[in-house]
Amino acid sequence: MFKIIDGKKLAHEMRMDIKKKIEEYKSESGKEIGLAVVLVGEDPASQVYVRNKIRACEEVGIKSFAYYLDKDTAQSRVEELIRSLSVDNKINGILVQLPLPSQLDAKRILELIPFSKDVDGFSAENIGKLAMNEPCLVACTPNGVMKMLESENIGISGKSAVVIGRSNIVGKPMAMLLTNANATVTLCHSKTKNLKEICAGADIIVAALGKAKFVTEDMVKEGAVVIDVGMDRDENGKLCGDVDFENVKAKCSYITPVPGGVGPMTITMLMYNTYLSATRS
């Protein structure tokens, strides 16, 4: 019998704990914790994400500073803003909402964020520390997945884990976190041969490739743990994940739903990273 890992419930519990920690920090230090969110342009999905992040800040007691820039904003203006936020003591975390308009060089902009304020965990310094299993700010979605596994006491050490998708935001840091937890990890992608066979031997599958219902029943062994990071639309326009949930669930010991699975954990881990950034500075 499978069990659904409820990301929404876990996220709520974690946010209550983060709120308590932030209240204690503010009481002891006399300081606020601040998160700067930079949005360039009017992408509807990005606007929703930013609103959700600001709402989460209010929920846990983080002061949010939102910067809304016109879609035609020059590279120099965005860089100037990031530099000023980097040296602002009121700001503990800086988040630039992606994607950026095409005229902007996202890599150059993100590189200006000091790794101590890189609450997304995307910087070369934080990724390098993660690779060496040293304390760092970890990318929010993969870290959220680890918290979900921990919440159900799912053993990782010695297990065979497959990560499908090699993005810098999810796939690669996910593989590093599982490796650091002593799993034997295979990182798969669009060029992987025999993907079905590789997945069918895995104890843990993390699907993060952005293709609706890509992981099918014949790719999953009995009793596997399946974590769905995808956020897609099916042929009817209905929200779904990278896993064919209805047909896969019966073979799993644990599975995450979409929506209500990994998604709520991502913003929760952003709040946690902002708290960590404040306490380490």
Image: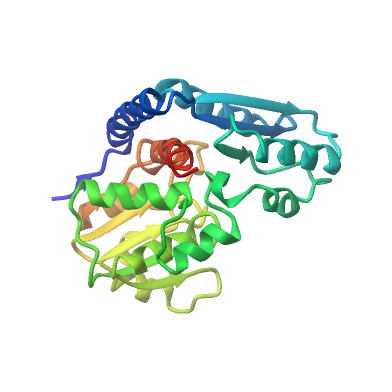
Q: Position of residue 10 (x, y in %)?
A: 28, 36
Considering every residue shown, the one lying at the far bottom of the view is 193
Q: Residue furthest front?
A: 29
Residue 244 in view here: no
In-image side of 92 versus 136 (left or right): right
Residue found farthest to the left: 1
Q: Position of residue 106 (x, y in %)?
A: 73, 50
Q: How many discs appear?
A: 0
Q: Residue at x 27, y 31 (%)?
A: 13
The structure residue drawn at horizontal position 41% and vertical position 57%, both measured from the top left corner, is 135
- The residue lying at 48 percent from left, 63 percent from top is 129
- State the image quarter where residue 226 is shown: bottom left
- Residue 176 shows up from this direction: yes
Q: Nearer the viewer, residue 117 or 264?
A: 117
Residue 73 relative to residue 169: left or right: right
Q: Quadrant of residue 87?
A: top right
- Observer-nearest of 86 and 201: 86
Residue 30, percent from left and from top: 44, 23
Q: In percent of the image, x 42 and y 41: which residue is there? A: 269
Quarter location, residue 117:
top right
- Asked if residue 146 is positioned above or below residue 48 in the image, the reply reads below
- Image coordinates for residue 181, horizontal then vertical, percent: 30, 65
Drawn side of residue 181 relative to residue 107, left or right: left
